[in-house]
Amino acid sequence: MFSGRREDVSQRVFQPQILGEAPYTPTLIELNPITQDRLFKSIHRSVRSFDAEFHRYVESKCLCINTYRLRGYVYDMSMFEQHDDNAFILYTVDQNGRIDATLRICRDLQSRLPVSAALPKEYPHFKEQGLALGEPGRFAIVPESCNFKRFISAAYEIGIYCQLDAYLLQIRAEQLGFYERFCSAELLSSEHAPPGCLHLIWRLDQTPPLFLRVFGNHQSDLLNLINAQGELQ
């Protein structure tokens, strides 16, 4: 989900003019940088081809694709993915107006979560329990950005607002201690995880008080923005 490793992604290839129309319609959520108190800045619930939101959608995916490529991660990743549909794509921008970090949050709606195929036993079990599930992923950040905390805070607040019970996570193995400490995340079977990765479940109602002390409580900020711009869908 989130990686503390920050590589040079100056080789980003942002070329929306060659991409054609977006077949999926995610909700874009811009976050304020860490220097501002308010976490959430704006919500755009529809992406029309070649409008400003479409360009942000493409730019966020370019950042993610190139970051993963430079890190040597082997993922089957396209510019437009089925799981983008009805997902939330979060991003922050730098002082020059370029996206410097991005995260996608999928909900278990029409299509199964991306990680579901890698959890052939646990995923059906969680569904039988009636858990409302989500999955944060596709996180990428440029070396100069200090906005990591923005995204884990936003993931928590969006999960609470959407009444999710838990997030399923795929993380790098070296990040396990972070998620155990701050999220009380539990280790799941990682038999089908990519090399060097682990699967976890983060039960939002079991998030420890330490999380809110470190990352803050921004639910009122999200609610104020929703009241001004409309419901998350």
Image (cartoon, helix red, strand yellow):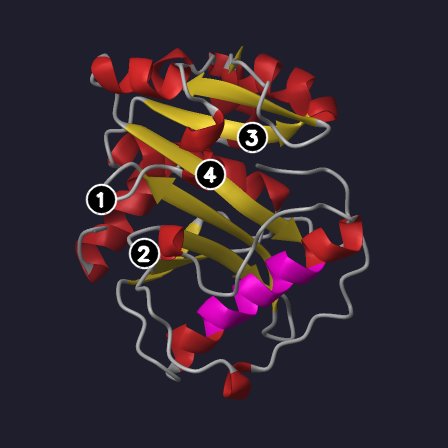
Tag shown at residue 110: 1
- The magenta stretch spans residue 223: no
Q: Residue at x 48, y 36 (%)?
A: 153
Q: Which residue is mark 2?
A: 85
In terms of secondary structure, where does tag 2 sit?
A: loop
In terms of secondary structure, where does tag 3 sit?
A: strand
Q: Amino acid at mark 4?
A: Pro
Mark 4 vs mark 3: which is more N-terminal? 4
Local crowd size for mark 4, using a 10 Å CA cut-off: few (<14), some (14–19), many (≥20):
many
Q: Residue furthest bottom?
A: 17
Marks 2/1 in contact by CB < 8 Å: the verdict is: yes
> Disc 1 and disc 3: Cα gap in Å?
21 Å
> Disc 2 and disc 4: Cα gap in Å?
14 Å
Extent of the magenta region: 56-66
Comparing marks 4 and 3, which lies closer to the viewer? 3
Comparing marks 1 and 4, which lies closer to the viewer? 1
Which of these two is toward me, 53 or 118? 118
Q: Amino acid at mark 2?
A: Asp
Q: Which residue is mark 3?
A: 170
Comparing marks 2 and 4, which lies closer to the viewer? 2
Q: Amino acid at mark 1?
A: Gln
> Disc 2 and disc 3: Cα gap in Å?
20 Å
Quadrant containing the N terminus in the rendered view? top right
